[in-house]
Image (cartoon, rainbow, N blue to C red):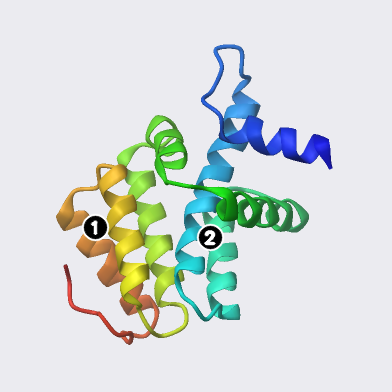
């Protein structure tokens, strides 16, 4: 239990100069997973389709075995519950991802938001806030939203571009 908590805190702290590339990759994976989970948690009714969309996003972004994906998702859910803001996670992503990778992540976040067929105001707010912290250009943000909505079948409330 204590080792798990230490691993959690180590994963979200600022990278130390001595942090290995492997540890930095794990921190980046956790930061990405937490933001996907935050969108999932923004909807008051947690749908299995949203959880599946989070898993699909993690599998697309990272090459992980099923058990690694499950563990990452579990850790992300735990971390998300204790998070007070998004900065710790978005700063890791800004350091570790190029713009193209961040845009793909934003699209995956939109896919989570649209996975249940509706877009709540809180999901939309989370998306807008994270996009701002990731320095996503507004046009790219809107295009990612439109691609995710189309992939979800074109449905979903709040479908108008920002």
Q: Secondary structure at mark 2?
A: helix
Tell me where residue 23 sits by quadrant. top right
Q: Please, is residue 54 above or below residue 104 in the view? A: below
Residue drawn at (30%, 63%) of the image: 125
Question: Which percent across, then down, holds residue 62?
Answer: 57, 48
Residue 21 seen: yes
Q: Secondary structure at mark 1?
A: helix
Question: Which percent across, then down, holds residue 68?
Answer: 73, 51
Q: Is the residue under label 1 in contact with that under label 2 (CB below 8 Å)?
A: no
Residue drawn at (18%, 78%) of the image: 160
Tell me where residue 143 sits by quadrant. bottom left
Which residue does the numbered mark 2 point to in the structure image? 37
Q: Which mark is residue 141?
A: 1
Judge left or right: residue 160 versus residue 14: left
Q: Please, is residue 6 above or below residue 123 in the view? A: above
The total of numbered circles placed on residues is 2
Q: Please, is residue 152 above or below residue 67 in the view? A: below
Name the residue furthest right. Answer: 1
Mark toward the viewer: 2 or 1: 2
State the residue in front, 77 or 65.
77
Question: Which percent across, then down, holds residue 10?
Answer: 65, 30
Name the residue furthest top. Answer: 18
User: On the rendered image, what quadrant is the C terminus found in?
Assistant: bottom left
State the residue in front, 79 or 154.
79
Label 1 Cα crowd, 10 Å radius (few <14 / some 14-19 / many 20+): many
Residue 65 seen: no
Q: Which mark is residue 34?
A: none
Question: Which percent across, then down, holds residue 29?
Answer: 57, 43
User: On the rendered image, what quadrant is the N terminus found in?
Assistant: top right
Q: Which numbered disc flags the more N-terminal residue, 2 or 1?
A: 2
């Amino acid at each position: 239990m204590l080792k798990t908590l230490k691993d959690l805190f180590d994963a979200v702290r600022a990278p130390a100069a001595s942090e290995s590339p492997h540890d930095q990759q794990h921190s980046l994976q956790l930061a990405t997973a937490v933001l996907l989970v935050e969108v999932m948690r923004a909807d008051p009714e947690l749908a299995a389709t949203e959880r599946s969309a989070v898993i699909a996003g993690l599998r697309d972004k990272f090459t992980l075995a099923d058990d690694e994906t499950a563990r990452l998702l579990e850790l992300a859910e735990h971390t998300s519950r204790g998070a007070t803001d998004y900065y710790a996670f978005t700063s890791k992503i800004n350091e570790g991802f190029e713009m193209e990778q961040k845009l793909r992540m934003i699209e995956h976040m939109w896919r989570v938001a649209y996975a249940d067929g509706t877009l709540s105001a809180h999901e939309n707010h989370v998306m807008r806030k994270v996009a701002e912290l990731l320095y996503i250009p507004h046009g790219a943000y809107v295009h990612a939203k439109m691609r995710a909505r189309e992939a979800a079948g074109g449905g979903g409330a709040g479908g108008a571009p920002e």
